[in-house]
């Protein structure tokens, strides 16, 4: 079984034990505002990389009418020497691009398969504009955990852990 298959199995086991998952439809569980706890990329050589070096600040919002937005930032980004966001140095621009990620669009839920599919309207990574991505999701207490099997950062999957915003 591949890494994504194992991750999907782990998500399924976590899901089966969750009382919350049994009480509400998936769409009702996803709704609202979520703070990012971690984004862990899995690579083909079985290594894991924290994409924000353990310093992520982010939020995802899922609305009742099927829209979503996601943004993640590394908290220790350096300020620009110029003080003007339009005039970073090349090195500053590359660093900032690697330390931030945002996208928005629409989503649908497949209750039977415990997945949701996003359609990306726009993104800081232009290559994924117009793409759709299916994500297996589980809940543990106030956490939502989903696997993106084709992350923009490469690798064999990205495990996103979120906590419901208060």
Image (tube, rainbow, N blue to C red):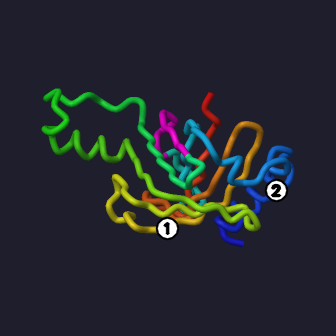
Q: Among all residues in the image, which is located at the extreme bottom?
A: 1
Where residue 129 appears, as percent x and y from the top left, is 37, 64
Q: Report whether 132 appears left or right of 9.
A: left
Decide: few, some or many residues near mark 1? Use Cα within 10 Å; few <14, some 14-19, many ≥20: some
Image disc number at residue 13:
2
**Which of 65 and 74 lies nearest the eye of the viewer?**
65
Residue found at x 46% / y 41%:
52
Decide: few, some or many residues near mark 2? Use Cα within 10 Å; few <14, some 14-19, many ≥20: few
Where residue 81 appears, as percent x and y from the top left, is 17, 28
Task: Name the residue that disc number 1 marks.
Answer: 132
| Magenta residues (range) | 51-61
What is the CA distance from the residue labelled 1 to the residue labelled 2?
25 Å
Residue 165 visible at all: yes
Q: Nearer the viewer, mark 1 or mark 2?
A: 1
Residue found at x 85% / y 55%:
16
Residue 59 among magenta residues: yes
Residue 45 visible at all: no
Placement of the N terminus among the 4 image quadrants: bottom right
Residue found at x 42% / y 38%:
73
């Amino acid at each position: 079984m591949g890494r994504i298959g194992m991750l999907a199995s782990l998500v399924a086991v976590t899901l089966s034990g969750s009382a919350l998952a049994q009480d509400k439809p998936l769409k009702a569980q996803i709704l609202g505002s979520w703070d990012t706890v971690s984004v862990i990329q899995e690579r083909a050589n079985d290594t894991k990389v924290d994409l924000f070096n353990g310093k992520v600040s982010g939020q995802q919002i899922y609305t009742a009418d099927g829209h979503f937005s996601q943004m993640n930032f590394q908290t220790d980004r350096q300020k620009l020497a110029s003080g003007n966001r339009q005039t970073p140095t090349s090195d500053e621009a590359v660093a900032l691009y690697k330390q931030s990620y945002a996208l928005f669009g629409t989503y649908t839920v497949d209750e039977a398969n415990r997945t949701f599919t996003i359609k990306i309207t726009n993104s800081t990574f232009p290559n994924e504009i117009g793409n759709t991505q299916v994500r297996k999701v589980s809940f543990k207490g106030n956490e939502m955990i989903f696997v993106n099997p084709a992350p923009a950062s490469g690798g064999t999957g990205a495990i996103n852990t979120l906590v419901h915003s208060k």
